[in-house]
Amino acid sequence: MKKTLIALAAVASFGASYAQVAITGGVDFTFGKTTAATDGSVSKGLAATDAYIDVGVTEDLGGGMKAVASMEFNSDGSWGANNYSGDKSVVLSGASGTLGVFNTRSSSILNNIMFAPEVSSTDHWTASANSGVMARGGVDALVVMLPAMSGVTLGYKYVEGGDGYGTPTSVTHVLYGKYAVGALTSVLEYNIRPSDYITGDARSQRLDLTATYDAGVAKFAVGYESGGLNTLNSTSAGTAAGAIFLSAVAPVGSNSVGLNYGKRDAASFTEVAAQYNLSKLTYVAASLGSFVSQAGVSTDTYGIRLGKNF
C-alpha cells in the first residue's frame, strides 16, 4: 500500500508541470409534487435528483495548442442504484481552431437557451417526458470549429445516433454558424441526414435557430426548430411539427428568477422558477410547472431543491 502511494505521488510530481486536473461536481435533493390530469392522482416525496462528479484534465501541448479531456460520473436516483457514465470528451484547440470528439446525449441548440433554474424531476422538454417537445438520446460526435472572425464562428458536426460500437442508428451532418457581438448572440444549425438513414417520405433536413440578448437587467432567448428529421413530410402533427422555445432569467441581487417555455404542436411545457444562493456553491431553488403531452393531457408539478456544488 505504501509503495502504491509513493508511486502515485511520483507520477503526480512529474505530471504536475504538464497537465492540470480539476474535479467538480454537485449533489442536490428535491421535494416534489406532481398532479396527473387524467385522474387527479398525486405523487409527491423527497428524492436525490442529481449527484455527479466531473473530472477535467487540461494539458499544454506547446505552440499555442492545448488538449482538454473531461468525463462525468453520475449517481443520482434511488439508494443502491448503479452509477452510470455521463458526458465524455477530448478537445484539441489552438490558433487554427478546435477539434473535439464527444459521447453525450443528442441536443439541439434549443436545449442551451433554457436559462431558468430547472427543478422538476422530469427533463420535461424531452420527448420521453413530454411526448414530442424534443427528443434526446445517446450519440457520438466529431466537432470541428474554425477560429472566430469579427464575431462569426463557423463549424461542422458529424453525429452518430446510438452511441458505442456498431452500425449507428442514424448519421447527421450539421453545419454550424454563430454570430456574437456585444449583448446579442445568434446560433444556427442546419442538419442534413443522408438517404441511407431516411425511411419512406420523410424529412432529410432540419433547421435550428436561436437568438439570445443579455440586457444586463435580464437575459432573453428565443429558439425555433423546424420539423424533425426522419418524420413524414405529409403531416404537421407531433414531432413532425416545428418547435418554438422561449426563456428569460433576471438577477435579483446574487439570486435569480426565470421562465422556460416550449411548444411543438399540441405538446408544451411552461415553468417559472427562482433560485436563492446561500453562497457561490450552495443554493435553494423552487419551480412551478405545467406540461401538456401530444395527446393533450396536462400535468402540474412543483419542486423545492437544496443543492451543493463543489
Image: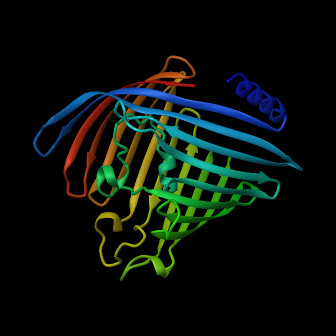
Q: Which residue is at 42% across, 52% downward?
A: 245
Q: Is residue 164 above or below residue 167?
A: above
Measured from the top left, where is residue 288 in percent x and y? Answer: 31, 33
Q: Quadrant of residue 146?
A: bottom right
Give me the residue at 23% from left, 39% from top: 300
Residue 59 position, x and y percent, is: 78, 42
Identify which residue is drawn at 34% across, 64% down.
239
Give left or right: position of 308 versus 125: right
Nearer to us in this view, 174 or 12? 12
Measured as percent of width and height from the top left, residue 89 is found at: 62, 50
Who's the residue at 58% across and 38% down the image? Answer: 215
**Is residue 84 depicted above or below 51 in this figure?**
below
If the image is split into quadrants, where does the C terminus sit?
top right
The answer, for residue 149, to whether it is visible in the render is no
The residue closer to the viewer here, 210 or 85, is 85
The residue lying toward the viewer, choosing from 109 and 181, is: 109
Please indicate whether residue 18 sits to the left or right of residue 141 in the image: right
Q: Position of residue 104 (x, y in %)?
A: 52, 52
